[in-house]
Image (cartoon, rainbow, N blue to C red):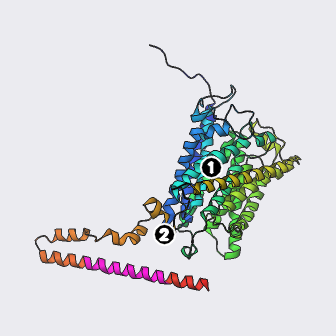
Amino acid sequence: MGKGYLWKEDYDEATVGFMLISAAFVFFMIPGLGFLYSGLARRKSALSLIWVVLMAALVGMLQWYFWGYSLAFSKSATNNKFIGDMNSFGFRNVYGKVKDDDTYPEIAFATLQMMFMCVTLSIVSGATAERGKLFPHMVFLFIYATIVYCPICYWIWAPGGWAYQWGVLDWAGGFLEIISAVGGFVYSYFLGRRRENLLINFRPHNVSMVTMGTVILWFGWLLFNGGSTLTPCLRSVYAFFNTNISAVMGGMTWCILDYRSERKWSTVGLCSGIICGLVAATPSSGCITIYASLIQGIIAGIVCNFATKIKYYMNVDDSLDLLAEHGVAGVVGLIFNGFFGADWVIGMDGSTEHEGGWLTHNWKQMYKQIAYIAAVTAYCAVVTALICIVLEHIPYIQLRVNEDAEARGLDEDQIGEFAYDYVEVRRDYYEWGVDTDNIHSSSGETQGNTDDSDETETDNISTIAETTTSISQNNHIDEQLEKQIDVSLSH
């Protein structure tokens, strides 16, 4: 009987464990995004946003296995400047070491990078809020991952990429923050604005869920950035702390700005500021000093707070502020690399040599950062727009639901399930029919007394009829009030 094959490669156990734990942390950010988006929306579309965020991650994992990893990190396309090849299609030969001196298997690296892309797609999926069809969006995301994410990822993280060879500083993926924001913003433009008559008294329906989602994101983000060293070292700890201090200052700054105008300590504002600080830290936490991260958090909180007005000037219904909180904050982080990038911070991993930014007298770094930002933004905007235009001309792939579906909510139209039972009760009361539970229990207790059972049944039906009439009257009153408000607003 022949012997089986034994894999003889040796790896550093701490490095492999660190990479897998980091991948798990990054994956945990996905449900955090779902809770955040769901809380920011209205009840009638709360569940659909959790669904679309989770399904976006599933689509990303399939695409990454199929050909995404090969296009983004192909080890045989060393002379390509734009994108990889198909040599690792279906994770072909993605197993152990790529080079003899590697301390981890290639599949561990591919797994961590897969989670990064899944988070990016989940951010983009927020653009569907309250009006986007779900299946067409999944088709969009698969194409977007292939011709937007993978090429740009190759530019900066693959050794053959032009940005990598040029020396652009982008630590844990400022590009993915920019493309998720720009991609979502362009997608929102093609979806169109939500119906104004359906946005009366609009506000986030569950701020507790927003807070929980933000905290989960913060938790995962610490190793999103800290784990980008791929191995536990001084630089990973430094990036961990930089991420935290940027989030702290971003949250405080945004909250103070909101208090200035509202005289209230907004929880949503606090969460928004924390996210801006985390996003800004993504490209910079492994490159800049700690005091620079403190300043960065303040600047990100201020700039992103005012950037929420951009969607009004451009007449785009960016309902979850993807452009302001992800795109603008990502740009802030990349610019801070140009100002405060330090060679001694970058070299904390013991293997990366770079001249840093202005802080260490590398004056040319700034124009590289700006050119990189412009290239990423322009490419993403143009290609995303082309994808949307093509999809809109394919039968059954229209991106937006009709007005009736928007009025009823995506939970009812696209999911068929509800985040909250009482929403379903209010809508489907008439379809549920008569509740006979009490009738049966009453007839069992008074068995043999037909008259009493009849009276009980009559009383129950009368009570249900009265309740139905009351709900109908309340709904009628609500409709009248909405009409009056519409008339007042029109004047």
**The residue tagged with tag 1: helix, strand or loop?**
helix
Q: Do the residues bearing badges 2 and 1 touch, measured as CB atoms within 8 Å?
A: no
Secondary structure of residue under mark 2: helix
Start and end of the magenta stretch? 461-480
Residue situated in front as seen by the camera: 224 or 51? 51
**Disc assigned to residue 144:** 1
- Residue 268 belongs to the span the image colors magenta: no
Residue type, numbered disc 2: Asp
- Residue 154: x and y in percent read 70, 41
Q: Which residue is mark 2?
A: 404
Q: Position of residue 491 (x, y in %)?
A: 62, 86
Q: Nearer the viewer, residue 115 or 62?
A: 62
Position of 240 with respect to 423 (left or right) is right
Image coords of residue 249 (percent x, y)? 71, 60
What's under tag 1, amino acid-wise? Tyr
User: Left of 200 or right of it: where is 468?
Assistant: left
Quarter of the rendering containing residue 104: top right
Residue at 61% across / 38% down in the picture? 110
Tell which residue pokes out farthest to the left in this image: 448
